[in-house]
Amino acid sequence: MNESTILDQHGRPMRRADLLQEVIHATAMGAHMAYNTDTIATALDPSRLRSILQAAATGDARDYLTLAEEMEEKDPHYASVLGTRKRAVAGLPIAVEAASTDARDEEIAEAVRRLVEAPEFGDMLDDLLDAIGKGYSVVEPIWQYRDGQLWPSGYEHRDPRWFQFDRLTGKRLQLLDNTGQGQELPKDRLIIHTPRLKSGLPIRGGVARLVAVAVMCKSFSLKDWMRYGELFGMPLRIGRYGPGAKPDDIAVLRRAVTQLASDAAAIMPDSMRVEFQEIANAAGGAELFERLAEWLDRQVSKAVLGQTMTTDNGSSQSQANVHNEVRRDILKADAKQVMTTINRDLVRVFVDLNYGPQKAYPTAALQVTEPEDLKALADALTPFIDRGLQVESSAILDRFGLAAPEKGAATLRPAGAVTQLPAMNQQKPCACGACGSQRVALNAEEQRDAIDDLVREELSEWQPLVRPVLDPLQQLAQRSTTFEEFRAGLADLLDEMDDTQLVEALALAAFKGRAMGDGGRQ
């Protein structure tokens, strides 16, 4: 079949051979230049930034996208927190769920698993997450035939400056041409990610727009800080010469004072001297610039990560845990949105090309696991297990990330547990089961000590000892017709009970136990 279900920009089915051709090519000149030497950040001021942001909001985003890229290259803090947010998503495990339990759907799902487990898929995911900063990102799959099917051999990230949003809705992406006009993009050929970071136009949703003012102000602060260091980093140097100094001598002194600033060494005549004088009212200036830069960094952290506790000092562990929950909400949203794009623009297209249109498609998802207090889980389960609650060991091993022990492997045991039974009890039980019961009895017997033997011996004669005490009570119960009559006769019953033999036997047993050392037993 020469035609596919993939349509071109005019809605016509494309030939499969055409799918092997790239949609967008980099050029040396024109709208799709591979190298871009434009720079915005070096001459940025509030007026210039205002013009850039206004132009981007009205359809001309080239300067804004250039600035967004330069911010990642020139501001270490912004690059760090934005990279943290991207890597938090890209590092999540991915799972694929079949559309149903049907064999055909399971086969398709297995093919999609191979698709998302390919090494190049991870790089593509990183490229798509560039949309977090700029508002959108475009990646083109490069298709090739493999084993009779079409598979992506790689993914090419396309420069966002090669595109623009349409002037009517501001939401439909178009390809720029050499005339500056927008061309409609072919359907199902590109992976276009426009995360919904805020309501409104996608170009206004990137975090680069949100933090641009803070990054600009920080650059001003750093420049002023450097100037301050040049002016006040070392004391004022004053060269003094006598009234009879000649112009050549004065020039020598000037060079000496200048060299002290850069080389910390100078040569001058004996009749001249250099004094170092501290500049008044300079104390605290350096702290001002440092606090301003740190405050601006915290605002950037809040804008990108939703919190500051894991990126800045001065926080407690409990505070960081609370703020990590806020960041986890952002992580969940980023993961959900990027996988929605991948399922729409890659998974569905891959299935249509190789298996034809389906009523339902497999779904790929990044798995965000919730943090769990495993110690609290263990402490909570222990008393229930001790009371007979049946818990599958494999479920607990999975929660703790532990593998089931292989047969014959050395395993950990509770402290004080018997690690090896006597050789006579290590034999394999016979089929009848009686031998096993006998060994259990033998084990219990071997664990007895002298005190246990004494107790067993004394209890063997308990009936004759308690009979003189229980007989009068039994006779009263037999002759009583009501409970009230039985309770009334209990007061006179003590004289009829003879506990002499019982008391003597208990006293003798206590004496024997003391002699055997029962006081040391717990």
Image (cartoon, rainbow, N blue to C red):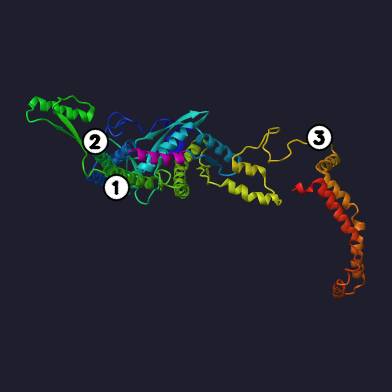
Q: Which of labels 1 and 3 is toward the front?
A: 3
Q: CA distance from mark 1 to mark 3?
A: 81 Å
Q: Badge 2 local density, few (<14 within 10 Å), some, or many (20+)?
A: few
Residue 10 appears anywhere in the view: no
| Residue 394: image location, x then y, percent | 65, 42
Q: Which residue corresponds to mark 1?
A: 57
- Say which residue appears at 70% left-offset and 52% top-offset: 387
Give the x, y percent position of residue 68: 32, 40
Q: Main secondary structure of the magenta part?
A: helix
Between 59 and 427, the one lying in front of the other is: 427
What amino acid type is highlighted by mark number 1?
A: Ala
Left/right of residue 47 with respect to residue 147 in the rendered view: left
Measured Cα–Cα span from mark 2 to mark 1 = 47 Å
Classify mark 1: helix, strand or loop. helix
Q: Residue, x 21% and y 31% (percent of image)?
A: 261
Which amino acid is tagged 2? Met
Judged from the image, the secondary structure of the residue bearing numbered disc 2 is loop
- Front residue (pair 127, 28): 127
Where does label 3 land, which residue?
A: 428
Q: Secondary structure at mark 3?
A: loop
Neighbours of disc 1 within 10 Å: few (<14), some (14-19), many (20+): some
| Separation (CA) of disc 3 from disc 2 | 87 Å
Q: Is residue 275 magenta?
A: no
Left or right relative to 211: residue 106? right
Q: Amino acid at mark 3?
A: Lys
Asked whether 497 or 310 is in front, the reply is 497
Q: Which residues are magenta?
A: 75-90
Pointer 3 or 2: first along the chain: 2
The quarter of the displayed image where residue 70 is located: top left
Left of 321 or right of it: where is 104? right
